[in-house]
């Protein structure tokens, strides 16, 4: 397993829609393994493949270090699709490994139903609520080329422009490896 550099705000790959995974081969298995290593090294709860430079429609989630979720097993989501979402919404603060040191209050559906494949390409239907629903929606957004900051109101987005520019230009300190500017 390897710790991969994380792509950052401004990297074009993060704005591209992910590509469907047709098969799970050794390269894909290694990518998934490396994603878990990378996410854990950066103290993340989720990570999308484009955050480590891959266009594959894959994200991972591990909430086992969160109080109340200790028994939750790490999950791999291949070709996920949100099929239902609740009308009820909640606002909670989010952050992102690709936008370090920036957090924002984001409104999302409280519950979602997602159909996806696991690492063995078994089809799974997940009904998630609370934190798990929020994390899978956040990571799913990444696969659609959407940042959590895109969901902030215009005024807040305006206030963040300077900070986002510093991240894009790698003008801040990072606690984990990041990609060089313009690599992706």
Image (cartoon, rainbow, N blue to C red):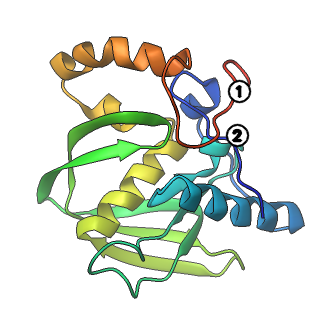
Query: How many marks are shown on the rendered structure?
Result: 2
Which residue corresponds to mark 2?
Answer: 53
Work out how far the residue at label 2 is from the one at label 1, CA to CA, in angstroms: 7 Å
Q: Residues within 10 Å of mark 1 (few under 14, many from 20)?
A: some
Asked whether the beta carbons under mark 2 and mark 1 sit within 8 Å of each other, the answer is yes
Q: Secondary structure at mark 2?
A: loop
Q: Quadrant of the C terminus?
A: top right
Q: Residues within 10 Å of mark 2 (few under 14, many from 20)?
A: many
Going by the picture, which residue comes out furthest to the right?
A: 26
Side of 91 where 20 appears, left or right: right
Residue 51: image x %, image y %?
Answer: 60, 43
Using the image, determine if residue 84 lies above or below residue 126: above
Task: Tell which of 14 and 113 is nearer to you.
Answer: 14
Side of 112 where 77 appears, left or right: right
* Residue 9 visible to an observer of this rendering: yes
Using the image, determine if residue 51 lies above or below residue 153: below
Residue 169: image x %, image y %?
Answer: 55, 14
Residue 24: image x %, image y %?
Answer: 80, 68
Side of 43 where 162 appears, left or right: left
- Residue sitting at 37 percent across and 59 percent down? 135
Which residue corresponds to mark 1?
Answer: 184
Side of 170 where 69 appears, left or right: left
Residue 23: image x %, image y %?
Answer: 80, 66
Task: Tell which of 20 and 108 is nearer to you.
Answer: 108
- Residue sitting at 44 percent across and 61 percent down? 45
Would you identify the image quadrant in which residue 10 lies?
A: top right
Q: Earlier in the sequence, mark 2 or mark 1?
A: 2
């Amino acid at each position: 397993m390897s710790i991969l550099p994380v792509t950052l705000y401004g990297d074009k790959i993060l704005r591209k829609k992910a590509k469907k995974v047709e098969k799970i081969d050794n390269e894909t298995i290694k990518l998934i393994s490396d994603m878990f290593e990378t996410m854990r090294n950066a103290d993340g709860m989720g990570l999308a493949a484009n955050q480590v430079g891959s266009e594959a429609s894959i994200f991972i989630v591990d909430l086992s270090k969160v109080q109340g979720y200790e028994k939750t097993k790490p999950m791999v989501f291949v070709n996920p699709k949100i099929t239902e979402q609740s009308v009820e919404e909640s606002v909670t603060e989010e952050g992102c490994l690709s936008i370090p040191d920036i957090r924002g209050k984001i409104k999302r559906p409280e519950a979602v139903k997602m159909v996806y494949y696991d690492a063995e390409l078994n089809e799974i239907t997940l009904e998630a609520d609370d934190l798990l629903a929020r994390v899978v929606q956040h990571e799913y957004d990444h696969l659609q080329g959407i940042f959590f900051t895109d969901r902030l109101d215009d005024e807040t987005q305006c206030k963040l422009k300077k900070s986002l520019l510093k991240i894009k230009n790698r003008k801040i300190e990072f606690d984990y490896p990041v990609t060089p500017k313009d690599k992706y």
